[in-house]
Amino acid sequence: MSSASAAVPAHASRSPSLKGRVRVPGDKSISHRALILGLLAVGETRIEGLLEGDDVLATARACEALGAGVVRLGEGSWRVRGVGVGGLASPAAPLDFGNAGTGSRLMMGVVAGHPIEATFDGDASLRSRPMRRILDPLERMGATVVSCAEGGRLPLTLRGAERALPVEYESPVPSAQVKSAVLLAGLNAPGQTVVLEREATRDHTERMLRAFGAEVSVEPWGAHGRRVALSGEPELSAVDVIVPADPSSAAFPLVAALVAPGSEVTLEGVMTNPLRSGLLTTLLEMGADIRLENAREEGGEEVADLLVRGGRLSGVDVPPERAPSMIDEYPILAVAAAYATGETRMRGLHELRVKESDRLAAVHAGLIACGVEARIEGDDLVVVGHGRVPGGGPAIATHLDHRIAMSFLVMGLGAERPVAVDDAAMIATSFPAFGPLMRELGAEIHLEAGA
Ligand SMILES: O=C(O)C1=C[C@@H](OP(=O)(O)O)[C@@H](O)[C@H](O)C1
Ligand SMILES: C=C(OP(=O)(O)O)C(=O)O
């Protein structure tokens, strides 16, 4: 459905020390959720610091199509006039989610809980991603898949339940998107909807549902998991949401400062929610000089300023149970590992195969193209760092994946020869100001067409 936009080739070359103080844009997960809960609440939700990336803008359009009044007042400042749980209308046209897994999957949960019908579509990357993990629990709650592409993929038409049923659902995959879709469907079901997760995943939906007035209980479950229970049919009331800076975007200037010698960079107000902080834990284990300053709370989330200084890194073993707290950060961790000394083994990365691209394969291929020693062993990625990266290979294939593009551009900042990527256009999905922000710090990153 989304027409393929023209590719934007880009390259990065060895840069002087990075210096400065910057704030990366608002968190993508929280931005999607703020709009969606704004749609489901009664009254006007005021959002400050919304990420204005393509993924989130697609969710804003979908909220409008389902009945919300959505207005942009200024940079990051948005208002959503909601229709309330139960008040949604069938959209007149298919909902185009572009590249966004989170937006499409969470909205499937919303639609599943209402007696309405909607068609979901997206770009070639989103059309290739598995949706059965979402559809299985939603069908149990009473939704019907009217039509879909092979294997339950997009384009897909979903008819929501006439009367949604509460479920107790144990997700076979560690996924905040699955958990969130079930909870959002459960909003319009009587009684308790329960999600059991063997490994705790990001908890923004639970936190925000509470802030909007829903009753949500969270208890430990198993060795690393949680039991999340929502009381259905709450009246959600509009609140003000302040979106903290996205740790998954901060990861790029953070690792850039670590690999460009002599760098000193401060990243302001980065969210430090423990369920999003696996990269920070891992980099500290590798010996990175990162200080958390001015720790505080913003909009119901912990945040801190991160002061990062370049220096030596050592290889480490990253345990599989850490994966949910850094699932989107493995591509950029692989870059840090390439500049480290010794072997880094990242364990249990099966979920990386079903992101915007097969990130395990894409990262491995990119590392090899940059002259870095790396191998895949089962679900593990092993990177053997020698403290230097040759670079200079063919353009890295990014497969419509923003994080692959940004990771390999950061790779180029310390490499002996420039690193090129075939297409940086998708960076606009999560971090539209990546190029200008990195250049402000002194990074030699150049995107064609002035992006
Ligand atoms: O819930 C969310 O906001 C997200 C959950 C994760 O996906 P999974 O739920 O598929 O692990 C993550 O990769 C994605 O970028 C955002
Ligand atoms: C996996 C990601 O996002 P989504 O699933 O929303 O496409 C990501 O941003 O890295």
Image (spheres, rainbow, N blue to C red):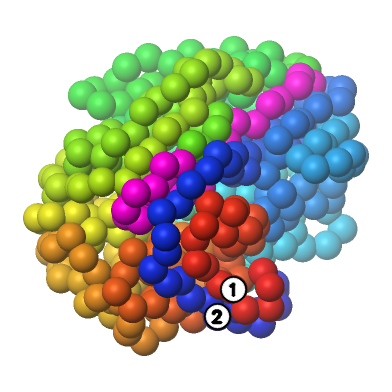
Residue at 48 percent of width and 76 percent of height: 11
Front position among marks 2 and 1:
1
Residue at 87 percent of width and 58 percent of height: 92
Report helix, strand or loop for mark 1.
Answer: strand
Residue 348 appears at what percent x and percent y? 21, 50
Is ligand 2 within 8 Å of the beta carbon of the residue shown at mark 1?
no
Residue at 63 percent of width and 58 percent of height: 436
Q: Is residue 317 above or below residue 6?
A: above
The foreground one among 27 and 69 is 27
Give the amino acid at mark 1. Leu
Quarter of the picture containing the N terminus is: bottom right
Residue 27 appears at what percent x and percent y? 58, 39
**Residue named by callout 1:** 447
Q: Earlier in the sequence, mark 2 or mark 1?
A: 2
Cβ–Cβ below 8 Å for labels 2 and 1? yes
The foreground one among 404 and 171 is 404
Residue 331 appears at what percent x and percent y? 35, 58
Residue 257 appears at what percent x and percent y? 39, 49
Give the amino acid at mark 2. Pro
**Residue named by callout 2:** 9
Q: Residue furthest bottom?
A: 394
Residue at 53 percent of width and 76 percent of height: 10
Q: Is residue 392 above or below residue 439?
A: below
The foreground one among 136 and 11 is 11
Distance between the alpha carbons at the discs numbered 2 and 1: 6 Å
Q: Is residue 110 above or below residue 439?
A: above
Q: Is residue 248 magenta?
A: yes
Q: Is residue 158 magenta?
A: no
Report helix, strand or loop for mark 2.
Answer: loop
Q: Which residues are magenta?
A: 238-265
Quarter of the picture containing the C terminus is: bottom right
